[in-house]
Amino acid sequence: DQQVKQNSPSLSVQEGRISILNCDYTNSMFDYFLWYKKYPAEGPTFLISISSIKDKNEDGRFTVFLNKSAKHLSLHIVPSQPGDSAVYFCALRGGTSYGKLTFGQGTILTVHP
Amino acid sequence: DAMVIQNPRYQVTQFGKPVTLSCSQTLNHNVMYWYQQKSSQAPKLLFHYYDKDFNNEADTPDNFQSRRPNTSFCFLDIRSPGLGDAAMYLCATSRGQGSTEAFFGQGTRLTVV
């Protein structure tokens, strides 16, 4: 029973264009939504997040959108840069006191120069 | 400066031979987590400590144990590793109550031969 799904295993984008990464979830109890970035042989690093009371959060080139009715989360990267090439995970918090995160499977983003 | 440190980065162990992975943190966070990530899959929470309180996920095999002797250190013990236990093991920390993001170490890649 997979509560969080990233249906695109990979995405290839030209430098300077927009990258859109998607994440769908089934559990309405998730209250905080995060994106992590992971380079090979490194641990995930926090990128951007949004709480369930908002529908958009922006930080520089990165914007996260939340559509609660559709249970859909997306990350937009504009403009994309070759250094953005990595695996991107969405991670959702279920409102517990200890902050348990449920991860998607990840999307491999490749940005071509 | 690394805040969550995992040792070793790479570990090779024999089938059935007990192995211990270690994690330390300089953040003084209350919560420490162990995640297992197999190739192309989502990181999966095995268990977490909230201070000294240990919490096992329902589907974590008995073969996996953990110790947290103090705030800074947490260990993952695999009593009898099988081939199916080969994975990346990720340690993470968070402040706890009301916290959102988790901070990850670089991971330990475990190979079972």
Image (cartoon, coloured by chain):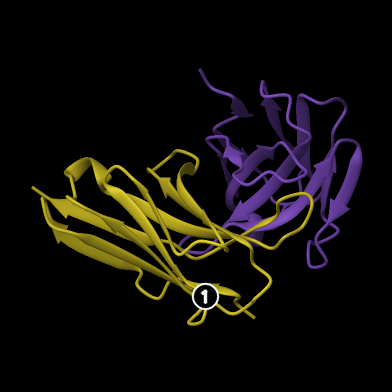
Chain colours: A yellow, B purple
Query: Residue A77: where, in percent of width, then height?
Result: 26, 53
Q: Can residue B18 be seen by looking at this rendering?
A: no
**Looking at the image, is B12 positioned above or below residue B2?**
below
Label 1, secondary structure: give it.
Answer: loop
Please state, as top left, top right, bottom left or bottom right, where the N terminus of chain A lies in the image: bottom right
- In the image, A21: left or right of A101? left
- Location of mark 1 (residue): A68
Return the residue nearer the eye: A28 or B39. Answer: A28
Check the image and name the residue furthest to the top.
Answer: B1
- In the image, B17: left or right of B40? right
| Residue at image point 29% right, 42% down | A60
| Residue at image point 82% right, 42% down | B49
Query: Residue A107: where, in percent of width, then height?
Result: 37, 62
Q: What is the three-letter code of the residue carrying label 1?
A: Lys
| Residue at image point 85% right, 33% down | B68
Residue A82 found in image quarter: top left
